[in-house]
Image (cartoon, coloured by chain):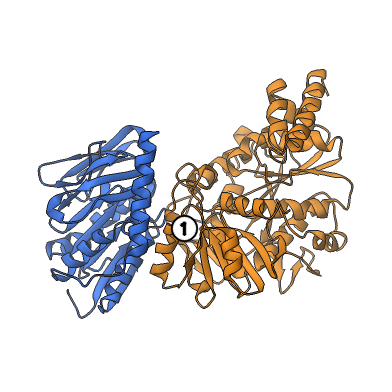
Amino acid sequence: MPLRAKVASSVSRTAAALSRAAGRGDGSVIGGWIGLKIDPDLLAHLSAGRAIALVSGTNGKTTTTRLTTAAVGVLGRVATNSFGANMPTGHTSALAKAGSTPYAVLEVDEHYLAQVLEATEPHVVALLNLSRDQLDRAKEVAMMAQLWRAALVRHPDVRVVANADDPMVVWAATPPADPAQGHVPPHVTWFSAGQRWHDDSWVCPECGSTIQRSGEQWWCTGCPLRRPQPQWTVEDDGVLDPTGAWHKVQLQLPGKVNLGNAATALAVAAEFGVRPVDAVSRLGVVTSVAGRYAQVDRDGRNIRLLLAKNPASWLEAFDMADVAPTLLSINARDPDGLDTSWLFDVDFSPLAGRQVLITGDRAYDLAVRLDVNGVPFQHVRTFDDAVRAVPPGRLEVIANYTAFQDIRAELDRVN
Amino acid sequence: MSTESLRIVWIYPDLLSTYGDRGNALILARRAQLRGMPVEVLEVRSDQRLPATADIYLIGGGEDGPQALGAQRLIADGGLHRAVAQGSVVFGVCAGYQLLGTSFFAKGTRCTGLELLDISSDRGPTRAVGELAGEVDPRLGIPYLTGFENHGGRTHLGPGVSPLARVTAGVGNDGTTEGAWRGKLLGTYSHGPALARNPALADLLLRWATGVHQLPPLDDTWADRLRSERRTAVADAARA
């Protein structure tokens, strides 16, 4: 590593430690920010000599990164950005802090995938899904898919592990080969993780025709784009690998969506030569991920935290949550997106029959939404009021990003 | 009403449903049902014929490509024009508002609109993203408009339409006026589930569709709280 990079890396670690000591955060961004100021190529320098996997998509990337890190851990030490700091500053911090490791698994914000591909030259990139998320500032889905596709064209050597169930991902992962330009199609391994949310892929990104669905199959009615045959699939409570062997997966994380994330993690690890039979038991050690799925006991209530940031992830959260009293909390601060319109893309009727409480900066938006859904609810001002309002036992908490962080702070920043 | 139930058509949800547009259909249906009206909501995809006999047609927002495609298909289909000629109500939001006009810009080219409203749209210097508020045309008899806008267009109104509102926060058509209406056709830049924050506007559409001059009041406690919270937020932002 050049001297400048060494200095930058060391300063970056110190800044992160100071940030944590000062109680200003977990230090996962500030260290990288300072390091990149000293050496703009620091991320590339820190990546050199490591076999790297990138994990990107709208939903599930933090959890899948954690599961993949556990799976690749079969081979040796793995650096990772485990706090959801998923932009280049976070990657820089994570790699600087980890010191020299043979492997790294990095969660990447979908907008930064091209830039991080460039800087880290990964061995494999996992593409999970693309759906609407914070449209007041984020790219629309088709544009995002186009950016991914263009980035993959520039990196024909990277191995791709991609979701066969999401037409936008499939299109992004299969750019046309152009022999004149020396472009070869990327090597893609397909997994099927299921997809409850379909409302961003009714129109073919290739030709604009309607996409038809039947069961798990989908196909474009106007061009050859269709669901590829996945090599990794979820079956019952386990994962089928490309050889046809079935591996029982015992997770401590709830929901079908996390079984899909487990299949993805095993598929990514396999690209490094990890056999699923060796990795599958390690997935069970992951209990919570930066507070997601964390359980805290307070005043006789067992509180479980579920993060849901956009329509697709709310659908998954309802599937994961037990039939129990449920607190919903919505904010619309900068990290959440300022627009609450998406609430009407979510069908809240699965909550009917449960005791529903609402809170957060934008509780009234939620109130109007639940009213339209005919779901009765009670508005509470604080998290403590919510805890007091429910009987002893499980309290499910479903919140969007900053609302989730507020509640996590109430619970002493539980991980 | 054309039949024994109120028929609401949501036009092309496969193309024009960017962010919560479904809300407008849900809210109209809910508010009609609470008054004891039977309601039928039809979601008509862009590869299907548009029925010309519904009472209310809803068109939502969308990206440039789907907007241009949606306009082409609606022109080719002709169903919406027949419905308007028979007196149906049309409510267009954002891209769905623009395409009701004579022309709009998408993907850098001027596209022909449905020519149902005397408006034309082009690109503005900046994208308008944020809270939108305005005082509604007093002839419509409804309180202030509140919403969220997210668009790059600017819309010019011809003599054949009236502005829906005078802008007090945000951009709307051009920073001065917001939306447009004529007869039973109404469009707004208040995107997505615009009716969630404007129940009186939802009731106006229901009154137009049913011919009933006064609808029984509903409990709008939560919508009223939301409206005043948003109004305060906009005022606070203006002071800051």
Give residue A119's position: percent from left, percent from top: 70, 32
- Chain name for mark 1: A
Give residue A87's position: percent from left, percent from top: 65, 38
Give residue A209's position: percent from left, percent from top: 42, 56
Q: Residues within 10 Å of mark 1 (few under 14, many from 20)?
A: many
A415 displayed left or right of B227: right
Q: Quadrant of the N terminus of chain B?
A: bottom left
Which one is nearer the viewer's eye here, A64 or B169? Answer: B169
B92 displayed left or right of B66: left
- Which residue: 76% across, 38% down? A94
- Which residue: 21% across, 54% down? B186
Amino acid type, label 1:
Ala
Residue A18 in which image quadrant: top right
Badge 1 element? helix
Return the residue at label 1: A363
**Number of numbered discs:** 1
Q: Colour of chain B?
A: blue
Which one is nearer the viewer's eye here, B75 or A131? Answer: A131
B190 displayed left or right of A366: left
Q: Which chain is orange?
A: A
Give residue B236's position: percent from left, percent from top: 38, 40
The answer to whether residue A63 is visible is yes
Please tell me whether residue A314 is drawn above or below residue A72 in the rendered image.
below
Residue ranking furthest to the top? A3
The answer to whether residue A316 is visible is no
- Which residue: 15% across, 69% down? B214
